[in-house]
Image (cartoon, helix red, strand yellow):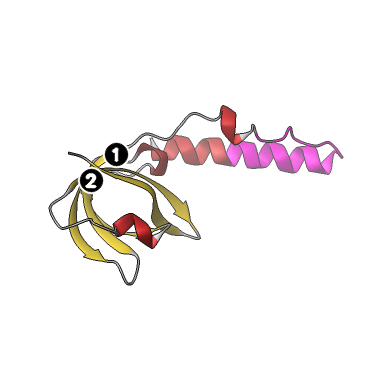
C-alpha cells in the first residue's frame, strides 16, 4: 500500500514537472470541502505530557498516514485536547503529518 502511494506521488510530480516545462499548469487541488473526511482511529491513552503537548497512544491502523497499528507518541495540534484525559482512556482520533511530525488533530473520548 505504501509503495502504491509513493508511485502515485512520483507520477504526479513527473506530470507537474512536464506540464511546467511545457508552459502549462496543472489543475488546482480540489477544495478541502470536497475531500473525503479522514477516518477516526481507535486508540487507548498510554502516557500523557500535557505541558509538552504530547500523548502516547496504542492505536489501530492510520490509513491516511499508511501506518499500521502500534503504540507511539504524538504531538497534539492543541494542548487543550488533553484536558481531562487520563491514562487508560479509550479514544477516537485523527492524525496528520504536520511539519514532519505525527500530530493528533482531533481527539474524542469514547464513553
Q: Give the spatial CA distance, label 2 vs label 1.
A: 7 Å
Q: Which residues are magenta?
A: 10-29
**Mark 2 or 1 closer to N-term?**
1
| Quadrant holding the C terminus | top left
- Whole-percent x and y of residue 1? 38, 35
Report the residue that reaches farthest toward the front: 84
Q: Is residue 93 magenta?
A: no
Residue name at image x 29 percent, y 39 percent: 41
Drawn side of residue 72 relative to residue 28, left or right: left
Residue 8 versus residue 95 in the image, above or below? above
Q: Secondary structure at mark 2?
A: strand
| Occupied quadrant, residue 20 | top right
Answer few, some or many: residues within 10 Å of disc 2's Cα (few below 14, many 20 plus, some between 14 and 19). many
Residue at the outermost bottom position:
51
Badge 1 element:
strand
What secondary structure prevails in the magenta region? helix
The magenta stretch spans residue 20: yes
Q: Position of residue 37 (x, y in %)?
A: 45, 32
Tell me, yes or no, whether the two marked residues, 2 and 1, touch with CB atoms within 8 Å.
yes
User: What residue is shown with label 2?
Assistant: 59
Count of numbered tags: 2
Q: Position of residue 103 (x, y in %)?
A: 40, 55
Residue, disc 1: 41
Task: Locate residue 67, reporting x and y percent.
Answer: 33, 44
The residue drawn where x is 78% and y is 37% is: 19
Amino acid at each position: 500500500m505504501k509503495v502504491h502511494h509513493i508511485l502515485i506521488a512520483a507520477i504526479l510530480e513527473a506530470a507537474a514537472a512536464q506540464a511546467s516545462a511545457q508552459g502549462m499548469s496543472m489543475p488546482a487541488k480540489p477544495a478541502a470541502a470536497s475531500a473525503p473526511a479522514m477516518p477516526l482511529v481507535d486508540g487507548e491513552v498510554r502516557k500523557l505530557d500535557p505541558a509538552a503537548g504530547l500523548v502516547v497512544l496504542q492505536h489501530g491502523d492510520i490509513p491516511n498516514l499508511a501506518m499500521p497499528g502500534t503504540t507511539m507518541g504524538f504531538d497534539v495540534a492543541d494542548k487543550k485536547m488533553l484536558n481531562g484525559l487520563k491514562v487508560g482512556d479509550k479514544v477516537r482520533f485523527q492524525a496528520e503529518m504536520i511539519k514532519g511530525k505525527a500530530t493528533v488533530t482531533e481527539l474524542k473520548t469514547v464513553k
